[in-house]
Amino acid sequence: MKKIATIALALGLTAGTAFAGGYSAPVVETAPVAVEAGSSSNAALIVPALLLIGVIAAASSDS
């Protein structure tokens, strides 16, 4: 019985020193995330627009 009381006393004394500094929440630093924005011009619209400009230029030069 004395051994159990001695062990309980030892554990009780060391448990108090384990939390002596108090709890402080861990600081988690996150890495910055770079988000690439999509381009505002669409390649599917550029090619027909250039062809339309070419047709208009060809039609106007014949007159």
Image: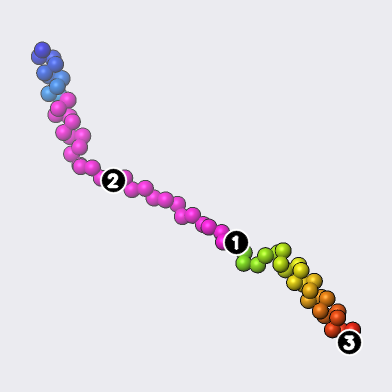
**Image vertical order of residue 58 relative to residue 31, above or below:** below
- Residue 44 x/y as whole percent: 72, 63
**Mark 1 and mark 3: span between their CA atoms?**
42 Å
> In the image, what residue occupies the spot 76% across and 69% down?
48
Q: Is residue 38 left or right of residue 13?
A: right
Secondary element under disc 1, as helix, strand or loop, is loop
Q: Please tell me how crowded label 3 is: few (under 14), some (14-19), or many (20+) other residues with Cα within 10 Å.
A: few
User: In which quadrant of the rendered view does residue 16 lie?
Assistant: top left
Q: Earlier in the sequence, mark 1 or mark 2?
A: 2
Residue 6 part of the magenta segment: no
> In the image, what residue occupies the spot 84% across and 84% down?
60
Q: Earlier in the sequence, mark 1 or mark 3?
A: 1
- Please tell me whether the stretch drawn in magenta is mainly helix, strand or loop: loop
What stretch of residues is rendered in magenta? 11-38
Question: Dots 1 and 2: beta carbons under 8 Å?
Answer: no
**Image vertical order of residue 22 relative to residue 11, above or below:** below
> In the image, what residue occupies the spot 77% across and 72% down?
50
What residue is disc 1 on? 38
Q: Earlier in the sequence, mark 2 or mark 3?
A: 2
Q: Mark 3 belongs to which amino acid?
A: Ser
* Extreme residue in the bottom direction: 63
What residue is disc 3 on? 63
**Mark 2 and mark 3: span between their CA atoms?**
80 Å
Secondary element under disc 2, as helix, strand or loop, is loop
What residue is disc 2 on? 25
- Residue 27 x/y as whole percent: 33, 48
Quarter of the rendering occupied by the N terminus: top left
**Mark 1 and mark 2: span between their CA atoms?**
38 Å
Q: Is residue 59 left or right of residue 7?
A: right
Q: Mark 1 belongs to which amino acid?
A: Gly
